[in-house]
Structures are given as C-alpha cells and as structure tokens.
Amino acid sequence: MTVPLIAGRHPLIVKNMTWPNEAATQSLARALAAKPAIRRALIELHGDLGAGKTTFVRHLLASLGVQGRIKSPTYAVVEPYTLKASSLDSGHNLELSIWHFDFYRFNDPHEWEEAGFRETFASPGLKLVEWPEKAGDHLPLPDLVIAIEMQPYESRRITLTAHTPTGAELLA
C-alpha cells in the first residue's frame, strides 16, 4: 500500500511501525486516546478490506470511554457518539462529540455533499474516517492519516502521517 499523498502538502511527521498482533493495535489506540489533541482531530484510515481499520477505531473509542457495542458504520455511513469528558485544561466536564464514518459504499464523491456532512466536519470533535478516498476531495485536510497494510502471519505495517500541528501533537 502506498501512503496517501495530499496534493500540495508535505507531511509534518511520518512514523512507521509494525503491529505484530491486536494488542499492538490496542496499544497505539490507548496512546492516541491519552493525547488532548484527539478531541479535535480528523483521522483518516486507509487500508484494504480486513486490514484492521474498524478494529483500531473500536480500540480507540473504548480507550476514550465509549461503552457498549461499537458498531461499524459500513451500512449507516456514520455512527455518532457523545461522551462526557473531563477537560485537561479547566477541570470542568465537557462533552466530546465523536463521529465514525465509513464511506466504503459511496459510488460517487458527491454523495458526501448530498449527505450533508460539511457541517459535521466543520464542528468541534473527533472525526474518524474509513475509506476517505471515496469522498474525493470533499474532505478537509486530515490531521493524521493511518495507513494499514496487511503482512504475513496477521501482522500489519503501519504508516502514521501527520499533516497538521494537531496531527503532530498526536504523534509527539
């Protein structure tokens, strides 16, 4: 798998790693969930069917405190979550809005516009996007791109690419 390049943008940070098993997937998810920047991030997930995109998202959402079953949005296109989260800055309880998108079933990038997602992507909160390439150039610049490539024996090669200061904070 080739790391997705964004026209006219040079990545701020690129990190490579291997996930030998699902425990490594969970470990990265926990590490990202602990970063304050996750609350405002747009994260794109790239990889073939079965690469582990949804598994990673499930571990990330569980690490953030989502309770119960975490469904794949393959048919619904989006699964929203709202969490009460303690603010690291003020100590007050705040809500964290999270949207998990899966654009696999899009046949045309204009479906993104027709679905009315522009407002959601402009609002505060965490956005996780599987199959972002199906939305064409409608998506805003991602903070972090996670590219997952299947390897022999169930391992995965991972490329993490930060495109914004928020993405760089997540990889620091």
Image: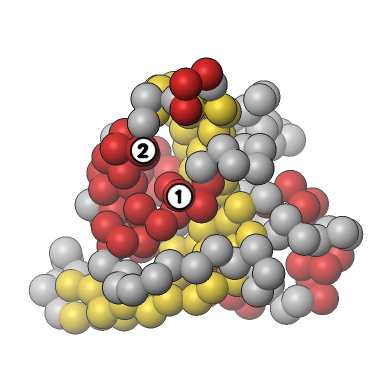
Left or right, 148 with respect to 85, comes to right
Seen at 52% across and 18% down, the residue is 152
Whether residue 131 is visible: yes
Number of dots carrying numbers? 2
Q: Which mark is residue 55?
A: 1
Image height of 138 relative to 153, above or below? below
Displayed quadrant of residue 69: bottom left
Seen at 73% across and 35% down, the residue is 7
Seen at 41% across and 57% down, the residue is 58
Label 1 with label 2: CB-CB less than 8 Å: yes
Left or right, 27 with respect to 61, comes to left
The image position of residue 158, as x and y in percent, is 48, 28
Image height of 21 relative to 109, above or below? above
Q: Quadrant of the N terminus?
A: top right
Name the element at disc 1: helix
**Callout 1 amino acid:** Thr
Image height of 119 relative to 88, above or below? below
Q: Residue furthest front?
A: 153
Q: Which residue is mark 2?
A: 22
Cα gap from disc 1 to disc 2, whole angstroms: 8 Å
The image position of residue 13, as x and y in percent, is 45, 28
* Mark 2, other Cα within 10 Å: few <14 / some 14–19 / many ≥20: some
Image height of 17 relative to 147, above or below? above
Name the element at disc 2: helix
**Callout 2 amino acid:** Glu
